[in-house]
Amino acid sequence: MRKKRNGVALWASGVLGVLLVISTGGGVLAAVPQELLRGLDEAIQGFLPAEGVVIFAGEKEVYVDVTAEKGAAVGKEYLVERPGETLKHPVTGEVLGRTRTLVARVRITWIRKKFSKAEIVESEGAMKPAVGDLVRPARNPIGVFFPPQSKDAGIREMAEEVAAAARRVPNVEWKTSDPRSLRTSRASGAVIEAGADVGIGFNVSRDGVTLVVASASSEKEPWTREIPRENLREARRAAAEVRESESAEEAEKTGGSAEEETRRSRRDEAAAVEANQKTERRTASANRGFHEVKEEEGNAASFRLDFVPVAAVPADIDGDGTDEMLLAEEKVLHVFELSTKGAREMEKLSLGWMARAFLLSAGDIDGDGRDEIFVTQKPGDYVTGIGYRYRNGKLKKFYKAGGKFLRVMKIDGKAELFAQRYGSSRPFQGKIERLRYRDGKMVSEPAVFPGKARLFGVARLGGGFTVSLDYENHLLLFNPSGSLLWKSPLRYGGSNRRIESADKKNAEEFRTGLEVFDLDGDGTEDLIAVRNLLEGGAERGFIRLGRLQRYSSGKIVGMQLRGDRLVKRWETPLFDGELTNLGIAKIERGPVVVVVKVRKTGWNERKAELVLLPL
């Protein structure tokens, strides 16, 4: 719906409220998402270092209630000020605040959860800090603005309006930085490198633009707002109409004809729309390239990939009875359609400029016949699990779990979602919990797994038996009551990826995963695992700091439960390359084991292939 009022066109938007097309002083028109701008001020303020008070004062040091969550960092300096007389407006009598007298300058030396310790760097005369004194950052906050890398006029105009709104936030000193720096480091890292307290960036995709406000010096999660590309198109069309109207009025004033100016404006707008459509068609064509079978090794088909995925999982996201293959780069999720002839990319989703995908999992947890997708991101010293659904040809976000790894496992043939917390002293901390989807919400409840089980190194066999990988990559078999029955002499599930705890004091190899499948259809399940080896066929227990060895080959092994132990039934030949992201997929010719093979081809170069092994 459109209304026209005083030369301003208003367009209704179901996502961001109202998009305004405003004529600026120079005659340039910009698409401004007003609801976004209203929330931008509050979002920026939320990432700025907060003020605090002195809670204990000593001779050479003070304790203050500013923390990492409030923007404190070791080495950051604060001013200690003493509140004084009340300030009142001489006419209205309104209380405006209190005077402040500088007492000292302090520097943070260490930080705890609810307070920080700071050394006194400089004092004003004989004054000393006292309990109740106020503390504030010694310098004004610095903000960094990363303009979007786009030639789209609507996107550029929107970015200019966002930058102008950000500069209206008081006391923040803004600078503009090259957005290409975000490609080589996580966004929050780029903010730190620029010496900033808060950063604003844009993620441009085929679907639209995502505005992100974030800071690595704060523990708060990034603030994001999505602007669909359709809204930008509507804003450009409205802007063109306003330009036509203004041109006609100007022509009437000067005695000229407005018709020629209107036709010229329409031609320019049509040319811009056509150029955007051509760009989108070229992008869609490139994204949906077909990957043919590279080779056949026995019954195994191999497809070469254009990138090295950090995570992969098969999933039937459209409910047609066959699985698609989901492959994730750090900031992009690719969806491939699998067949015996090759793999075709059918969807590509940008996860955001702050994203750093780490884990993928999928399964039909709500019983509608279509698998949900769960992406665990680890952009820094925190973890976020996000759930997506494939609806109307698009991946849509529907769930978010802060601080948790997410994984779907099949228990008695039914897909169930499990979670485990990311720990400060160890990567996987606490017990595994089950998440049930009820009445449109996720409900947490206890899950029956051994206490030391890690979410991505555990599997459930029939009869309630559990298999888990320990810290040194040995398989552990537990009976239904949780008692240890058996420990494998060989090691499984290792990888060249390392996952650190939040304090970076402990790390362990990320597991390639364990899968369970009934190969013979006789009700007895096989445990399927990866066994990666070093050069020369040696195995490794776990990563040690400073050790540069890397897995260079691997095989897939199938085992069955026999009495109180697991017995090997079969194994594949040795593959040239590390095997990662083990899964089971349903394709046209039946179920297959899928695994990503990563091979080192140069000093700092790797190539990846997707291997399908029929069962």
Image (tube, rainbow, N blue to C red):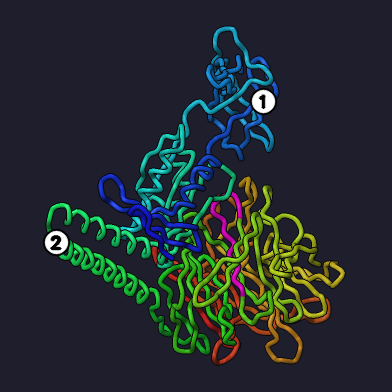
Mark 1 or mark 2: which is in front?
A: 2
Q: Is residue 157 visible?
A: no
- Label 2 amino acid? Ser
Please tell me the numbered disc located at residue 63.
Answer: 1
Cα distance in 3D space between marks 1 and 2: 74 Å
Location of residue 574 by image quarter: bottom right
Indicate whether residue 374 is drawn in magenta: yes
The amino acid pointed to by label 1 is Tyr
From what the image shows, is residue 139 above or below residue 587?
Answer: above
Please report the residue visible at 52 percent of the width from the left and 86 percent of the height from the top: 300
Chain-order first, disc 1 or disc 2? 1
Within 10 Å of disc 1 (Cα), the crowding (few <14, some 14-19, many 20+) is many
Q: Quadrant of the C terminus?
A: bottom right
Q: Position of residue 340 (x, y in %)?
A: 48, 89
Q: Residue at x 58, y 69 (%)?
A: 388
Percent x, y of residue 240:
28, 61
Work out whether 306 lies above or below 154: below
Q: Residue at x 76, y 68 (%)?
A: 476
Q: Which mark is residue 240?
A: none
**Image side of residue 39 versus residue 400, left or right:** left
Where does residue 27 sit, x and y in percent of width and height? 26, 49
Q: Which structural element holds mark 2? A: loop
- According to the picture, the residue beneath numbered tag 2 turns out to be 257
The residue furthest top is: 126
The local crowd at label 2, few if under 14, some if 14 to 19, many if 20 or more residues have their Cα within 10 Å, is some
Q: Which residues are magenta?
A: 372-383
Residue 17 or 456: which is nearer the viewer? Answer: 17
Front residue of this view, candidates 571 and 67:
67
Q: Horizontal placement of 187 versus 444: left or right?
A: left
Q: Is residue 550 above or below residue 322?
A: above
Quarter of the image for the N terminus: give it.
Answer: bottom left
Q: Is residue 264 left or right of residue 179?
A: left
